[in-house]
Amino acid sequence: MVTRVFVCIIFIVLGVAATAAAELDLDQEVLIIPDTHNEKPYIRHVRRNPRGYELALSDSPLKAGEEQPYIFRILSPSGMPEGDVHVFITDDDLHAYVHRKASRKGDEYSFTYRPPGAGKYRMEIVFQTAQGWVNLWKNIKISGPAAAGAEDKLPGDEDYQAKIKLIPKKAYAEHVVTFLYEILYKGKPLKGLEKMDGFDMLVASWDEDLKEFLYITPKQNLGGPEVAVSIVFMRPGKHAVFAEFKHNGVIRRIDTVVFVNEEPRSDPGAIENMGPGY
């Protein structure tokens, strides 16, 4: 299973310990890190389970440890989705993760998945319409038993490491925090990231209560070795962040957990704003 630790110091990523924070190379094109208070361009406006939409799943039983098709339909008041339909799945303790693009045949969508274990899972369907982005979600139950962690490791994962730096060092709800990833391959900076939907990285995140789901892409795509992904978390608390990158035709994953603090009060008399003179 991919190891996740808190953001406060250094992450263990893809089973290998990071040893230093990523630094920008000023001799090359510089990544732009946004002002942490200018959050509006970094909020993805998505309607979650809006009125009139319904996610209809197949009645076929879902079993852990088996690669099987998942079939669903999107009932919509404004016609079929435009473009790709993305599927994100996690279990209720945020250990399992998968991201698929659904195939379409007529009015049905399908994808295949082998759940690593039995239990409760959350499925998020994300797509674009003429009126903007829509996110439909549904809780599903997987029967078992099966060994957990079967989906988490791929051959060759041990050749990749990632150093991760947060800018600023603490994340606050309703403010931008930038995850600066530096990806290494066999100990050397990886400059040959392959694009996924035109992006160097695709990132998904849930809070620990599964009340906030985010799908984020970087605004600059320079091919590595550094990728900056700016996120605005709206809820304080723990958030699991799953980042995907592609190299040599294989999509690999970086899992982290970040604690998001409550937005600081603007009142000068608030205890968190008091200085030594008070």
Image (cartoon, rainbow, N blue to C red):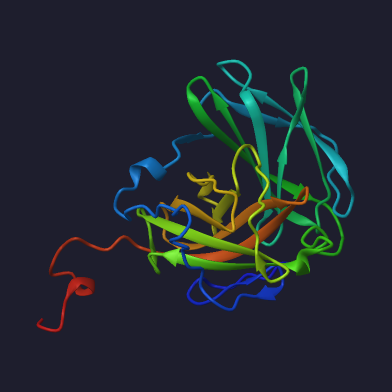
Q: The C terminus appears in which quarter of the rendering? A: bottom left
Say if 106 sits above or below 248 in the image: above
The structure residue drawn at horizontal position 74% and vertical position 19%, both measured from the top left corner, is 107
From what the image shows, is residue 111 above or below residue 265? above
Q: Residue at x 23, y 73 (%)?
A: 272
Q: Depth check: 228 or 150 in front?
A: 228
**Residue 42 vs residue 90, the one in the foreground:** 42
| Residue at screen point 66% across, 41% down | 196
Residue 275: x %, y % from top left: 16, 79
Q: Quadrant of residue 184?
A: bottom right
Residue 93 seen in this snapshot? no
Q: Nearer the viewer, residue 13 or 67?
A: 13
Residue 14, visible in the rendered structure: yes
Write down the quadrant of residue 209 in the picture.
Answer: bottom right
The N terminus lies in which quarter of the figure? Answer: bottom right
Q: Relative to 6, is 70 on the left or the right?
A: right
Q: Position of residue 149 (x, y in %)?
A: 79, 64
- Furthest-left residue in this view: 277
On the image, the x and y values in percent for residue 72 come to 74, 30
The tally of labels here is 0
Q: Nearer the viewer, residue 179 or 215?
A: 179
Horizontal placement of 255 versus 32: left or right?
A: right
